[in-house]
């Protein structure tokens, strides 16, 4: 479906880099009229509208993942481009983030409902100095939906807080999120804190966030990297399985 929503079409004009234009354009063309309206309302920060539209879509049988990918995340991709290119600034992004949260509030119970007995325990947080939590929260929703118990440490999480949470909850997995190149090194510092606490062999550590790559994860000594929330769940399952096999072999 072409982009029929006039407001969204104007917003799409801000996306000028060829690769991004293709990627974002494909997502928007996958979106039907209602999802295009969700994306546009998110970009303009109309949180009450996002709240209403997402509720309506889910009530009409849209899959939570469709609303997330074709509506909310497609809109947030344009917000990201406009922010980077200095077309909008922090206040506008915060308003869009509020709209994102209004939509995610309806999606959360669906993605988090699993009914599966707990498969493992994860502590998850955004690293020290970093206040971005939308991606982390999405990962948490998906992990809970896959049957993991997740303790959310929030944003600006110090290495000591990660270590203390693992001790307190007996978690096998740690998930760290970073969205800033300046805070990415705090992932490495957190890994060092686990080594210093003598806990490095007890946990498996996974990392993610837009600037993080597999290469960076390897360099830092993380056990796993995931590009998105679906990969986060896959990685969590894989790491937990390996940890259990290792622990069984030691016994
Ligand atoms: C929203 C936003 C904000 C909001 C955050 C609101 C909130 N509650 O989160 C606000 C306005 C607060 C903000 C502030 C700032 N921001 Co900002 N922000 C963004 C923006 C537009 C979107 C981020 C987002 O939510 N994306 C959507 C989510 C779903 O994607 P995600 O976070 O990448 O998460 C997915 C994956 O990465 C992965 N994932 C995430 N975490 C994890 C963890 C694990 C373990 C795994 C496996 C996977 C995984 O799964 C997620 C779901 O698929 C990005 C642009 C962008 N394109 O990323 C800039 C961006 C990250 N911000 C940026 C900047 C510069 C800032 C500020 C410094 C601006 C300023 N001058 O003050 C401040 C820093 C504040 C701080 N100390 O943290 C830059 C960073 C540049 C850089 N190279 O470091 C970006 C890239 C924009 C840009 N291009 O300039 N920002």
Image (spheres, grey):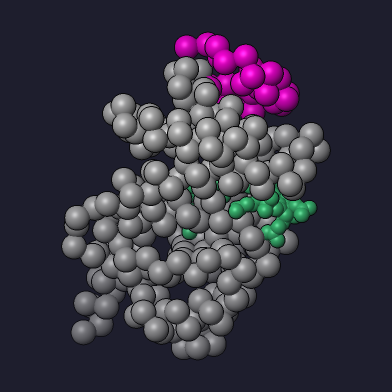
Front in this rendered view, residue 77 or 34: 34
Front in this rendered view, residue 36 or 55: 55
In magenta segment, residue 127: no
Front in this rendered view, residue 110 or 168: 110
* Percent of width and height locating residue 186: 64, 70
User: In the figure, 59 relative to 101: above or below?
Assistant: above
* Percent of width and height locating residue 136: 50, 56
Residue segment shown in magenta: 1-28
In magenta segment, residue 7: yes
The residue drawn where x is 66% and y is 47% is 94
User: In the figure, 160 relative to 244: above or below?
Assistant: below
The residue drawn where x is 38% and y is 30% is 56
Whether residue 143 sits left or right of residue 104 in the image: it is left
Q: Which quadrant is the C terminus positioned in?
A: bottom left
Residue extending farthest to the bottom is: 197
* Percent of width and height locating residue 219: 59, 64
User: In the figure, 63 relative to 177: above or below?
Assistant: above
The residue drawn where x is 39% and y is 53% is 141
Q: Main secondary structure of the magenta part?
A: helix
* Percent of width and height locating residue 128: 64, 70
Q: Is residue 57 among what the camera can see?
A: yes
The residue drawn where x is 41% and y is 84% is 167
How many marks overall? 0
Q: Is residue 231 among what the camera can see?
A: no
Dividing the picture into quarters, in which one does residue 174 lie? bottom left
Residue extending farthest to the right is: 86
């Amino acid at each position: 479906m072409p982009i029929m929503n006039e407001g969204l079409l104007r917003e799409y004009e801000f996306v000028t880099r060829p690769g991004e234009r293709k990627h974002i354009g494909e997502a928007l063309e996958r979106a039907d009229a209602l999802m295009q309206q969700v994306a546009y309302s998110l970009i303009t920060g109309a949180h009450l509208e996002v709240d209403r539209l997402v509720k309506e879509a889910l009530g009409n049988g849209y899959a939570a993942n469709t609303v997330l990918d074709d509506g909310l995340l497609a809109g947030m991709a344009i917000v990201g481009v406009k922010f980077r290119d200095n077309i909008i600034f922090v206040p506008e992004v915060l308003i869009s983030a509020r709209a994102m949260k209004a939509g995610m509030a309806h999606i959360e119970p669906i993605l988090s409902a699993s009914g599966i007995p707990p498969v493992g325990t994860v502590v998850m947080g955004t690293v020290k100095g970093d206040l971005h939590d939308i991606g982390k929260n999405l990962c948490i929703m998906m992990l809970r939906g896959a049957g993991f118990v997740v303790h959310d440490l929030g944003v600006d999480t110090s290495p000591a807080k990660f270590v203390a949470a693992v001790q307190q909850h007996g978690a096998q997995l740690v998930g760290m999120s970073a969205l800033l190149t300046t805070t990415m090194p705090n992932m490495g510092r957190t890994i060092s804190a686990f080594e210093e606490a003598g806990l490095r062999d007890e946990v498996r550590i996974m990392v993610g966030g837009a600037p993080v790559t597999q290469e960076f994860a390897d360099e830092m000594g993380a056990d796993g990297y995931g590009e998105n929330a679906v990969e986060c769940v896959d990685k969590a399952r894989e790491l937990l399985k390996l940890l259990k096999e290792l622990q069984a072999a030691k016994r």
